[in-house]
Image (cartoon, rainbow, N blue to C red):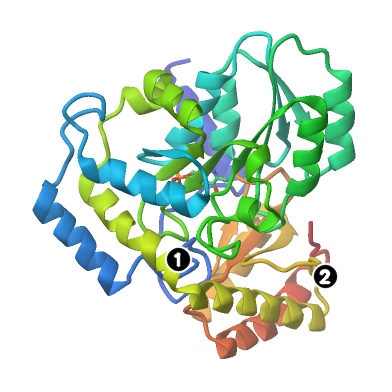
């Protein structure tokens, strides 16, 4: 069989499973982006990006360790560290790249990494590039993690890795409990704050701040293309840890530095996150309101609703059908299918942002109740 024939067969199988994906422009009321604080279109940020391009040009021209470095990267990294409450941060072009790099850098042969079963693909891929033994623990399960940490024989270092707010499930990891277990067992805790940074904690720096576990975290990953509205990711930790990334992290070293204008714009955002607390307050209020509405409509709802609300449908085709109905009614809700989520858990992933109105949510819940009840008798929540 030629590679063309084999690829054709693979694509046919994807189509047969109802999993063919299409790229479609935004249309309708945004209920699917990660622009939770509506910063991506903020006029002040757009101006900052333009000003950054005028100052620094379009591209950086090389790796940070060669001619690609500019002072603005140092500046934004120290501003982010101050927000995050850590000694130092390193800025990567994307969160995916950050996760591809950090595990390979810190995890050595003889080490073991304990990873939540629902961790993001970039964490899974990052771990694959390392030589450590990988142990999967049940999603958010403190006792399962504890027993695995105690039963696996590890010669070197132990690491525990989790998202703080899960991207496709909208639930929050028990970080306080993980911190305590890591202290007891001498494991190093790695927290991916992709969907929490900018939103949680008094200063908006994330769940680590909210739970007060700074001293128990080895490194955190903080994406800048979601709530922060721009692009890239900061990896934060203590001085020595981040210095080692500069010296050895392959995905940092062997990649052209991001456009400096992006760092210039981010420098503006960090100030806005700190000063404009009302954005976070509004997002929390909307999350609670939407949770209440769904619950009243008969949908099971998490104890603590967040801005990410999954409505698990099950079969891919059905999730797509429900999403199209909502799209026809003017809501930009997208279906999330395997392999992004486990088999049999295709879902709508509704993500709220500060620009959505209470009236829109009311209309959405009425519609959801109608469509989901009518079409899918078996709808359930994770
Ligand atoms: C989105 C995401 C990433 C990847 O970040 P990008 O900047 O989009 O590459 C990493 N981890 C988690 C948990 C994410 O949700």
Q: Which type of secondary structure does the marked residue at label 2 adopt? A: loop
Q: Which type of secondary structure does the marked residue at label 1 adopt? A: helix
| Rendered position, 199 above or below 82 | below
For the residue pair 278 and 24, the one nearer the viewer reads as 278
- Residue 369 horizontal/vertical position (percent): 73, 80
- Residue 142 horizontal/vertical position (percent): 85, 41
Which mark is in front, 1 or 2?
1
For the residue pair 329 and 111, the one nearer the viewer reads as 111
For the residue pair 238 and 301, the one nearer the viewer reads as 238
Dot 1 and dot 2 residues touching (CB under 8 Å): no
Report the residue at 66% width, 82% height from top. 367
Q: Which mark is residue 242?
A: none
Q: Quadrant of residue 145?
A: top right
Asked if residue 28 can be seen in this view, the reply is yes
Report the residue at 85% width, 26% height from top. 148
Q: CA distance from mark 1 to mark 2?
A: 34 Å
Asked if residue 167 can be seen in this view, the reply is no
- In this image, 335 relative to 342: left or right? left
Which tag, 1 or 2, sits closer to the chain's start?
A: 1
| Rendered position, 359 above or below 141 | below
Find disc 2 in the rendering and name its residue. 300
| Rendered position, 177 above or below 348 | above
Report the residue at 50% width, 73% height from top. 277
Around disc 1, counting alpha carbons within 10 Å, would you say few (fewer than 14), some (14 to 19), or many (20 or more)? some
The C terminus - image quarter: bottom right
Find disc 1 in the rendering and name its residue. 274
| Rendered position, 373 above or below 366 | above
For the residue pair 322 and 63, the one nearer the viewer reads as 63
- Residue 347 horizontal/vertical position (percent): 67, 58
- Residue 105 horizontal/vertical position (percent): 50, 20
Around disc 2, counting alpha carbons within 10 Å, would you say few (fewer than 14), some (14 to 19), or many (20 or more)? some
Query: Is the C-beta of the residue carrying label 2 under 8 Å from the nearest atom of ligand 1?
Result: no
């Amino acid at each position: 069989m030629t590679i063309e024939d084999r690829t054709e067969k693979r694509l046919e199988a994807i189509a047969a499973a109802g999993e063919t994906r299409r790229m479609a422009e935004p249309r309708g009321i945004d209920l699917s982006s990660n622009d939770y604080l509506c910063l991506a279109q903020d006029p002040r940020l757009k101006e900052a990006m333009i000003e950054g391009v005028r100052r620094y040009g379009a591209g950086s021209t090389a790796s940070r360790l060669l001619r690609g470095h500019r002072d603005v990267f140092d500046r934004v990294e120290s501003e982010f560290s101050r927000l995050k409450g850590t000694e130092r941060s390193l800025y990567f072009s994307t969160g995916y790249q950050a996760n591809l790099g950090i595990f390979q850098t810190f995890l050595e042969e003889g080490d073991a990494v304990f990873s939540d079963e629902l961790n993001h693909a970039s964490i899974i891929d990052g771990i694959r590039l390392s030589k450590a033994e990988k142990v999967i623990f049940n999603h958010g399960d403190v006792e399962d993690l504890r027993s695995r940490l105690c039963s696996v024989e590890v010669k070197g270092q132990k690491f525990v890795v989790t998202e703080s707010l899960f991207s496709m499930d909208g639930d929050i990891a028990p970080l306080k409990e993980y911190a305590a277990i890591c202290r007891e067992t001498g494991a190093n805790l790695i927290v991916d704050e992709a969907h929490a940074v900018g939103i949680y904690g008094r200063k908006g720096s994330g769940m680590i701040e909210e739970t007060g576990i700074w001293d128990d975290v080895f490194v955190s990953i903080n994406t800048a293309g979601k709530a922060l509205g721009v692009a890239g990711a900061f990896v934060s930790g203590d001085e020595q840890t981040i210095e080692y990334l500069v010296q050895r992290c392959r995905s940092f070293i062997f990649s052209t530095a991001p456009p400096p204008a992006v760092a210039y714009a981010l420098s503006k955002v960090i100030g806005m996150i700190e000063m404009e607390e009302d954005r976070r307050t509004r997002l929390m209020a909307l999350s609670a309101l939407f949770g209440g509405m769904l619950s009243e409509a008969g949908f099971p709802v998490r104890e603590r609703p967040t801005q990410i609300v999954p409505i698990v449908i099950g079969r891919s085709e059905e999730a797509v059908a429900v999403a199209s109905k909502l799209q026809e009614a003017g809501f930009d809700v997208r279906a999330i299918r395997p392999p992004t989520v486990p088999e049999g858990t295709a879902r709508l992933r509704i993500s709220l942002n500060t620009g959505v109105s209470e009236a829109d949510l009311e209309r959405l819940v009425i519609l959801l109740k109608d469509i989901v009840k009518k079409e899918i008798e078996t709808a359930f929540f994770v």
